[in-house]
Image (cartoon, helix red, strand yellow):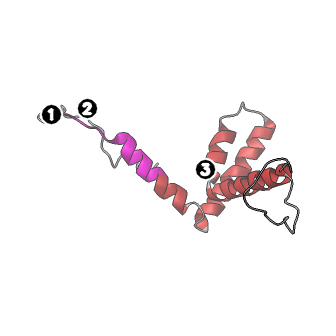
Amino acid sequence: MPQETPSPLDLPEPEWEPASALGWTTGVIFFASILLLVGNAVSLRDWINDQPPSPLQAEAGAIADAWVSFSRAIGLGVPRDALHAQWKRAEAARFTPKGVEIPAGEGADPQAGASN
């Protein structure tokens, strides 16, 4: 902070030097990436499967499938699966005005997408 700025309080100088903004940002991005890799393996697998077919994509897909199986086996995917099920139920919900009936077969079953 420039010394020319008037302040009603005289604050002491910090005893430590704050980390550089680039270092802090890198740490946050790294932490978020690890958290997403651990807790959202399904999205990683889906992204890999959307890539153009190639030997590298096939190998990455196999590794991603193994990671999804492992993370589900130890319970890391439970929060993501619960949130995904809620999202699918909300996505399938149909709101109709009072007194309007939906013909049979045209409405979505809110439980149908819950297992996806």
Q: Earlier in the sequence, mark 2 or mark 3?
A: 3
| Residue 75, percent from left and from top | 57, 67
The quarter of the picture where residue 67 lies is bottom right
What residue is pinned by disc 3? 42
Q: Amino acid at mark 2?
A: Glu
Judge left or right: residue 39 versus residue 112. Answer: right
Q: Earlier in the sequence, mark 1 or mark 3?
A: 3
Q: Amino acid at mark 1?
A: Glu
In this rendering, is residue 44 above or below 19?
above
Residues rendered magenta in the picture: 84-97
In space, the residues marked 1 and 3 are separated at their CA atoms by: 37 Å
Q: Secondary structure at mark 2?
A: loop
- Whether residue 23 is visible here, answered yes or no, is yes
The quarter of the picture where residue 56 lies is top right
In this rendering, is residue 85 above or below 100?
below
What residue is pinned by disc 2? 106
Q: Earlier in the sequence, mark 2 or mark 1?
A: 1
| Residue 101, percent from left and from top | 15, 33
